[in-house]
Image (tube, rainbow, N blue to C red):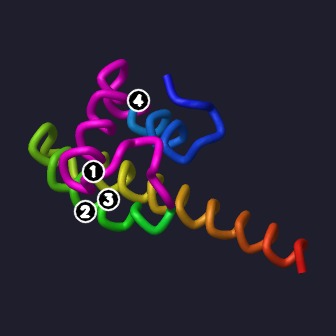
């Protein structure tokens, strides 16, 4: 399992909420296949593209658009929170 504080670990937690134990495998596959990076290298700037692939792939697994949108929105919110934290750290370092 990835480090708890990493963006990838947090994305896996979200994925697991929708896919259970398959969440980590699903997220790892989306990142390595579509973003062509190692999951631990996931950055907030990558999340928008990741969400596009998650929406498409998860929609194949379920026809419940409410769940597809909820999954995508939680990932986008995670990226937003990560960016806000970075901004606060950068302002503090000035």
The residues bearing labels 2 and 1 have C-alpha atoms spaced at a distance of 11 Å
Residue 80 coordinates in the image, percent (x, y): 57, 66
Q: Say whether marks 3 and 2 touch (CB < 8 Å).
A: yes
Q: Label 2's element?
A: helix
Residue 91 coordinates in the image, percent (x, y): 84, 78
Sequence order check: which comes first, mark 3 or mark 1? 3
Which residue carries the number 1 mark? 68
* Crowd rating for badge 2 (residues with CA inside 10 Å; few <14, some 14–19, many 20+): few
Q: Nearer the viewer, residue 77 or 31?
A: 31
The residues bearing labels 4 and 1 have C-alpha atoms spaced at a distance of 13 Å
Q: In percent of the image, x 34 and y 29: which residue is there?
A: 23
Q: Which mark is residue 51?
A: 3
Q: Is residue 84 left or right of residue 21?
A: right
Q: Label 1's element?
A: helix
Q: Say whether marks 3 and 4 touch (CB < 8 Å).
A: no
Sequence order check: which comes first, mark 2 or mark 1? 2
> Is the residue 55 above or below the residue 87 in the image?
above
> Is the residue 60 above or below the residue 75 in the image?
above
Q: Say whether marks 4 and 1 touch (CB < 8 Å).
A: no
Q: Label 3's element?
A: helix
* Crowd rating for badge 4 (residues with CA inside 10 Å; few <14, some 14–19, many 20+): some
Sequence order check: which comes first, mark 4 or mark 1? 4
Which residue carries the number 4 mark? 16
Asked if residue 73 lies in the magenta stretch, the reply is: no
**Front position among marks 4 and 1:** 4
Q: Is residue 62 left or right of residue 32?
A: left
> Is the residue 1 above or below the residue 51 in the image?
above
Q: Is residue 70 left or right of residue 60?
A: right
């Amino acid at each position: 399992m990835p480090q708890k504080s990493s963006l990838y670990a947090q994305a896996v937690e979200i994925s697991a909420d929708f896919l259970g134990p398959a969440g980590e495998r699903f997220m790892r596959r989306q990142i390595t296949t579509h973003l062509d990076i190692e999951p631990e290298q996931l950055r907030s700037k990558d999340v928008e593209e990741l969400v596009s692939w998650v929406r498409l792939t998860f929609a194949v697994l379920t026809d419940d658009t409410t769940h597809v949108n909820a999954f995508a929105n939680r990932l986008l919110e995670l990226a937003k929170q990560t960016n806000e934290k970075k901004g606060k750290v950068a302002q503090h370092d000035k």
